[in-house]
Amino acid sequence: MEQSMAKVRNREEQGIGIGSASFEKDVLKLPLMAGGVMAAMVGLWGLTCLAAGLIQAGGPLSLMGAWFSAVMGG
C-alpha cells in the first residue's frame, strides 16, 4: 500500500495526473490556437477583399468615391 501511495504522490509531483495544471494548460492550448488561426484567416480574407476592391475601382480615391456614392445613394 505504501508503494502505491508513493507512486501516486510521484505522479502528482510530476504533473502527470488528469487533474494536473499542465494537463489543463494543454487542453486549453488547442482552442486558443484554433481561434488565433481563424482570426488570422479572417484578417487575410479581409485584406484580400480590400485589395480586390482597390484593383476593381481603379485606386484608393476611386474606391472611396464609389463607397461614398453607394452610402449616400448617389
Image (tube, rainbow, N blue to C red):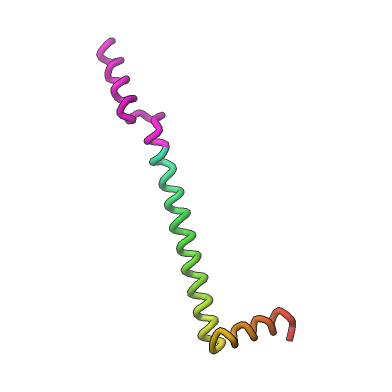
Task: Report x, y in % for residue 7.
Answer: 27, 20
Q: Residue furthest left?
A: 3
Report whether 7 appears left or right of 30. Answer: left
Is residue 2 found inside the magenta-colored segment of the image? Answer: yes
Q: Quadrant of the N terminus?
A: top left
* Residue 40 versus residue 64 in the image, above or below: above
Report whether 30 appears left or right of 70. Answer: left
Is residue 20 found inside the magenta-colored segment of the image? Answer: yes
Task: Report x, y in % for residue 24.
Answer: 42, 36
Report whether 60 appears left or right of 19. Answer: right
Quadrant in the rendering for residue 70: bottom right
* Residue 70 versus residue 16 in the image, above or below: below
The dominant secondary structure in magenta is: helix
Task: Report x, y in % for residue 52.
Answer: 51, 80
Q: Residue furthest front?
A: 61
Quadrant in the rendering for residue 61: bottom right
* Residue 48 versus residue 17 in the image, above or below: below
Q: Which residue is painted at 49% across and 70% down in the image?
A: 45
Q: Which residue is painted at 50% across and 79% down in the image?
A: 51
Q: Which residue is painted at 53% across and 76% down in the image?
A: 50
Task: Report x, y in % for residue 44.
Answer: 46, 68
Q: Residue furthest bottom?
A: 58
Q: Which residue is painted at 30% across and 15% down in the image?
A: 5
Total number of numbered discs in the rendering: 0
Report whether 58 appears left or right of 26. Answer: right
Q: Quadrant of the C terminus?
A: bottom right
- Which residues, given as a range, are shown in magenta? 1-24
Q: Residue furthest right?
A: 73
